[in-house]
Image (cartoon, grey):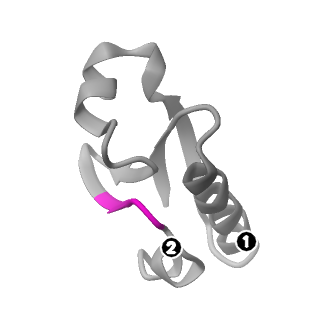
Amino acid sequence: MHVTFYTKPNCHLCDEAKAMMKLVQEDFPLTWDEVNIELDDVNHEKFMLMIPVIAKDDEVLLYGTIGYVDVIGLF
């Protein structure tokens, strides 16, 4: 599964979510594009209160505090 991971610098929830995604990636086919919302006004306005956000095909799948079980639940 390929997803988009919306994040921003110095975001501890984003760092934790990315670590969980890397753990899941060891057992499941998970890949992602990482998007810094601070580089795009539209993404910043859309996601600034939700990050981190995992989306697929413009549909938000997970946001906020994202744990290992949450990411596995996508499969």
Range of the magenta residues? Answer: 61-65
Q: Check the image and report above or below for 62 versus 56.
A: below
Instruction: Name the spot of residue 50 as percent of width and height, x first.
Output: 33, 49
Instruction: Name the spot of residue 44 as percent of width and height, x first.
Output: 33, 26
Quadrant of the image occupied by residue 40: top left
Predominant secondary structure, magenta span: strand
Q: Does the segment drawn in magenta span residue 6? A: no
Instruction: Name the spot of residue 60 as percent of width and height, x first.
Output: 27, 54
Find the distance from the CA under tag 1 to the CA under tag 2: 10 Å
Say left or right for 16 vs 49: right
Q: Amino acid at mark 1?
A: Leu
Q: CB atoms at circles 1 and 2 under 8 Å apart?
A: yes
The residue where tag 2 is placed is 71
Please name the residue shown 31% across and 26% down the image: 43
The residue where tag 1 is placed is 23
Q: Amino acid at mark 2?
A: Val
Q: Secondary structure at mark 1?
A: helix
- Mark 1 surroundings: few (<14), some (14-19) or many (≥20) residues within 10 A: some
Q: Check the image and report above or below for 5 versus 71.
A: above
Quadrant of the image occupied by residue 61: bottom left
Q: Nearer the viewer, residue 40 or 55?
A: 40
